[in-house]
Image: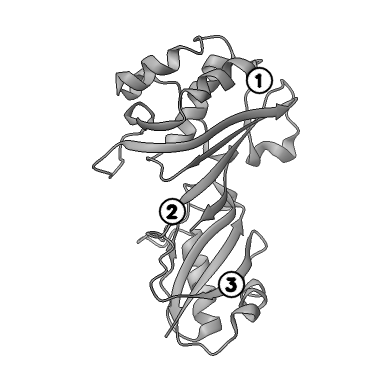
């Protein structure tokens, strides 16, 4: 029995998130497992670094599976990509130790959120960013973002439905940068709550447009109340960039 790690890129626009659904709704996991089953000639159960939501994209999602196939790992990406739609690509496959678990072995992961901060959005970009037409200042958002770095109780940024017993998480960085009209938010952490990144982005944009001062971020964290933070950013601007183990 072999344990194989896959690095996966996908455009999530046409899928109902990563996780396979019982009702057969098309998801990234379902499409990948079906393709894998044809290639390795047995059913496959993928374990991923995390479950991306409907419309969320990835450049470096990671998943692993057990297999008895003799196909060399370096040949698997080509074999799989010929059976996958063009919006899902296997970037790399490698044999890993038996105890490697794409879910449980994660050290850190980086999400990037993209905002198009201009009144006129080119239609081709609609699926890959949040069209936020209100003008935003980057400096106040950077000041507020600095207050999110470190270990905090992020309950104010967790949407209803999170399944974790603890809402304490550690952000290693929360960078806000851009090249007009683009604004990017890079969040690296050891783990994230349900919709945490999207809720943080929505809150920082409220600060960027002048609704709150940068100092409000401390009050929002301490409130431990979702109603104290800003709106949730839509899924299409979010991308999982990479995962480190």
4 over 25 or under it: above or below: below
Q: Position of residue 21 (x, y in %)?
A: 39, 59
Q: Is residue 149 above or below residue 13?
A: above
Can residue 136 be seen here? The reply is no
Residue indicated by mark 2: 50
Q: Name the element at disc 3.
A: strand
Q: Is residue 63 left or right of residue 128?
A: left
Q: Is residue 206 left or right of residue 105?
A: right
Q: Position of residue 89 (x, y in %)?
A: 64, 64
The percent position of residue 156, horizontal first and vertical second, equals 35, 26
Q: Earlier in the sequence, mark 1 or mark 2?
A: 2
Q: Which sits earlier in the primary sequence, circle 3 or circle 1?
A: 3
Residue 91, compared with residue 106, is above or below; it is below
Q: Residue at x 66, y 28 (%)?
A: 177
| Residue picked out by circle 1 | 133
Separation of marks 3 and 2 at Cα, in angstroms: 18 Å
Structural crowding at the residue carrying mark 1, measured as other residues with C-alpha within 10 Å and reported as few (<14), some (14–19) or many (≥20): some
In the drawing, what numbered circle is on residue 93?
A: 3
Report which quarter residue 94 is drawn in.
bottom right
Q: Answer with mark 3 or mark 2, whichever residue precedes in sequence.
A: 2
């Amino acid at each position: 029995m072999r344990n194989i790690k896959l690095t996966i890129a996908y455009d999530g626009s046409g899928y109902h998130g990563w996780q396979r659904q019982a009702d057969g709704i098309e998801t990234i996991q379902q499409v990948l497992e079906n393709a894998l089953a044809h290639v390795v000639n047995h059913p496959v159960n993928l374990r991923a670094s995390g479950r991306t939501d409907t419309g969320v994209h990835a450049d470096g999602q990671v998943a692993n599976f057990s297999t008895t196939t003799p196909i060399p790992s370096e040949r698997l990406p080509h074999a799989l990509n010929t059976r996958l739609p063009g919006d899902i690509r296997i970037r790399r496959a490698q044999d890993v130790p038996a105890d490697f678990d794409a879910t449980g072995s994660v050290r850190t992961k980086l999400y990037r959120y993209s905002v198009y901060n201009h009144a006129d959005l080119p239609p081709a970009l609609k699926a890959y960013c949040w069209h936020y037409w209100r003008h935003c200042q980057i400096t106040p958002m950077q000041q507020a973002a600095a207050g999110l770095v470190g270990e905090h109780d992020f309950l104010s940024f967790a949407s209803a439905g999170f399944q974790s017993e603890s809402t304490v998480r550690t952000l290693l960085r929360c960078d806000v940068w851009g090249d007009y009209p683009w604004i990017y938010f890079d969040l690296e952490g050891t783990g994230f709550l349900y919709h945490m990144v999207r809720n943080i982005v929505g809150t920082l944009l409220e600060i960027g447009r002048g609704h709150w001062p940068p100092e409000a971020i401390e009050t929002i964290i301490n409130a431990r109340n979702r109603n104290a933070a800003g709106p949730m950013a839509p899924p299409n601007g979010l991308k999982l960039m990479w995962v480190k183990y």
